[in-house]
Every structure is written in structure tokens, then in C-alpha cells.
Amino acid sequence: MQDWSPDSWQNFKIAQQARYTDQKLLTDVLAELSLLPPLVSPIEIDDLKQKIAAAAKGEAFVLQGGDCAELFSDCNAEVISTKLKILLQMSLVLIHGLDKPVVKIGRMAGQYAKPRSAETESINGISLPCYRGDLINSPEFNEKSRTADPKRLLKGYSFASLTLNFIRTLVENNFTDFSDTKNWDLDFVSHSPLADEYHEIMSQIQHSIKLLDNLTNHHSNSSIRDKIYTCHEALHLQYEQALTRQSDNGEWYNLSTHLPWIGMRTAQVNSAHMEYMRGIKNPVGLKVSANTSADQLLRVCDILDPENEPGRLVLITRMGAHSIEQTLPPLIEAIQSQSRTPLWCSDPMHGNTSVTQQGIKTRRFDAIIDELTAAFSIHKKMNSHLGGVHFELTGEHVTECVGGARGLTEIDLHRAYKSLVDPRLNADQSLEMAMRIVKVNQLLEGDRSSNIGSQKLNNPNFKIE
Ligand code: PEP
Ligand code: CO
């Protein structure tokens, strides 16, 4: 890679960084981090790249999901396994309904740094630095907590590694085995209005596995061990740099995660984040918003993926249900005009955040569905392909997004709102989302010869039952 090194980003303008007062401590911490072992391996990363390439061609489907902001305090067996359970349940519904492999990527084991829209937060006339995620400071509203603490970088590394270790242990012990899904039956979901539909899917899959076992005279149990990949926003570049390592083949990899992405607030053409991301060998994600112009998108693609390498680039669109019809098509057209083959992924969460009259950040389930539906339909209409989805979700019984089969309202938001940053789908809503994705696709697939399906889907009054 020409003129690139893991620290060349330092010559570029950078946004959204913490200000550390103790520079000596920061330098020491970064030196220590750079000597610690990597969290993931180049082989796993290359493997994911191939799977992303397959999804870009429509041969697989990517499910990316997890917290907006992972918390250090959530690094425990219950929270981690619950999050895995919901990802696995969703993937089961998708595998069954879309009839293709599902690549599972958790926003986990390192999603600790957050971009913020304001530098400071003011309460009762007191102004303090905003909370930037557990990797940087802590959410309590006092000066000590909000001061950026370099030692948190080491903690973040440790919690990421503990989380990954637990995920690997679960996978090794057949937690992901589809023939034994009772491992990941969520108690909450068994009382859900969707429970019957989900259990029917589950038993059909188990029946198929048994049939295969009987046909091949082989017990597939241990062979259905599936991989879980990780992703996080590569926001804190000093941290990312310290975990960027050269592999035996001379290539540089970010070994803190499989799939780093750059968020909307740092994805400018000549930014430090763009410079850092262009040199690493990982697949890289790029958030694309309603404000991204076709020209800007193509310039960014040239920087991040000059060779149009299969599986390298994931374009995560987060347009907003109200604007996707106008803003997504020109971007697809631009990508097609250059015969580029990124994986298109829809993040229907970040363009659909609203604030209630009580000042609570929420997202309406219907708006999320509307953006997703439109994304699938637009891609299909344009002969493009939407090969993945990106959600903020949790397996816990939270009440942060309104709507869904249980009909959560704004009043429910007071009951179990835990997220410190963006509102997440709870387990029920997540599972319903997976079922809706299947239904949207079946509807679009069932209507190959004309665009009646997409006309229906484009009608704001049309709902898929
Ligand atoms: C996020 O994914 O949590 C996020 C901040 O997204 P965006 O950069 O798209 O706003
Ligand atoms: Co978010």
C-alpha cells in the first residue's frame, strides 16, 4: 500500500476524538496495547471477506447487530449469551425464509466508542464533556467521570477479549448448533405473539437436519458449528492503530475486530479515518446517509476499494424512511455506472430516530420496517442487490423502540429503557424484524415478472401482514 502506514492517519484532519489531559499516560497505555496479543486473526478476517463477497452476489445474507454502545458493565455471561441467542434466532428465521446461509456479525466485543453530535452536555447551567462511550469516559454527570481516561483503553481491550473468549467458548460447545436450538430459546420470546411462528420454523429446520442425518447416516450435530464475527465503529484511531498488526504476508490487518466500519460523522474524503481504513486488509464498512452525494460516494469507494476487491467494501445505508426513495437510487446508479460490487447493507435504525415530547430518544418499529422494505424494493427494481441488514438490538426485554407485535407505546419507554445512546430493538422486535425481512423478500420474489410488488411496497399505506 503506497504511502500508508498504521499511523499515516495522523497527518490528516480528525473528527470526534477524545481530548486527553494526561498525554504521558496515553502514550504509555498505547505502547502497552501495541504489545498485547491480537483479538482476531487474519485467517478469520479473510474468511469473512469471502463470505461478504458471496453476500454481495446474493449467495449469502449478512446479519449485523448488537448494541449502539456496548458497556463494560455488560461484559457478563447473561448479557453476552442473550445477545447471541437473538442473533441466532434471527439467523434461523432468515436461513429458513431466504434459503441461503446467513453470516452473523455482532456489534460486539469492542463497540465501545461513540461519535456524538455535541462536544458538551449541559445540565442546570453546568457544562461537561459529553459521554463518548466506555472506551473513553463514563456516563455519570460529574467532572471526574466525564474526563477522558487513557486507562479505559486497556479496559476496553480486556473486556473485548473476555467477550470474544466467551463467544468462542459458546461456539466451541455447540451453542450455535441448529439441531439443538433449545440452547438459545429466550424465555421472553416463548411468551411473544410470534412464538408459534418461530417454533414452527425451528421444528421445520430440525426436521430437515434429521432427514439429512438419516439420508447420510451421519449425525450432523457437531458439524453445524457456526462462526460469529465481530464488528465495531473504528472511531478511536489511536486504539485501532495499536491493534493494527502486520501479518506474515506483509499485509496490515486491524486485529481488534473482523469488520471495522467508519461512521457517518467521520467518513469524509480527506479525513484521518478514511486514511486509516484504506490501508488495512480487513473488509471495511462505510455508513452512507441521505446527505452523501453520488460523487462523494464514488470518491470514497476509490480510496477504500481501488481494486474493486470482492468482499472488501460494505456500504451501510441509513437514509431514513422519509427520504430513501429519493436518496438511495442515485447512489445505486453511481455504483452501477462504475461496475463496482460492494455489499449493500441496510441500517434502517439511524435515519429513523425521533425524540418524544418527554425528550426520550426512540425509533418507531414501522419506520424501521418502511426503510427496510423500501431498501429491498429499490435494489430489486434497479437490478441491484441488498445483501445484508444492520440493526441496533439486544436480546434483553428492554422498551426503547415503540411498536412491534406487542404494541409498545411511548408510555412503555419509561419501563425498561437502558441504552445510554441509541434505542435498540428488544428480542421480540428483533425476531419480528427477521420475519418481516423474509416476508418482504418472498413478496418481491413472488413477483419477478412485473413491478407490482414494488408498487405495493412503495405505497405508504401498504403493510405486509
Ligand atoms: C452507529 O452505528 O451507532 C452510528 C453512530 O451510526 P451513524 O454513524 O450511521 O450515525
Ligand atoms: Co447508534
Image (tube, grey):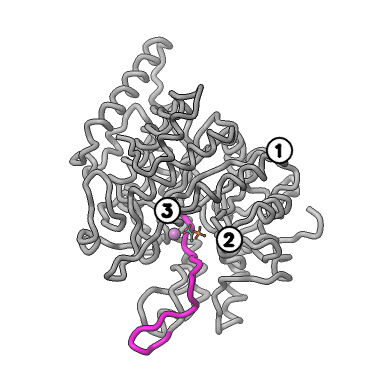
Q: Which of marks 2 and 3 is nearer the N terminus?
A: 2
Q: Residue at x 48, y 68 (%)?
A: 135
Q: Which amino acid does label 1 sit on?
A: Ser
Q: Name the residue under label 1.
A: 339
Q: Mark 3 points at which residue?
A: 349
The CA distance from mark 1 to mark 2 is: 41 Å
Q: Element at badge 2?
A: loop
Q: Which residue is drawn at 31% across and 55% down?
A: 401
The relative height of residue 185 versus residue 114 in the rendered view (above or below) is above
Could you tell me residue 460's position as x and y percent? 38, 44
Q: Mark 2 points at which residue?
A: 36
Q: Which of marks 1 and 3 is nearer the N terminus?
A: 1
Q: Element at badge 1?
A: loop
Q: Would you say residue 63 is visible in this rendering?
A: yes
The relative height of residue 448 versus residue 393 in the rendered view (above or below) is above
Q: Which amino acid does label 2 sit on?
A: Leu
Majority secondary structure of the magenta segment? loop
The answer to whether mark 3 is within 8 Å of ligand 2 is yes
Please state the extent of the stretch shown in magenta in the rendering.
Answer: 108-127
Q: Is 449 on the left-hand or right-hand side of 181?
A: right
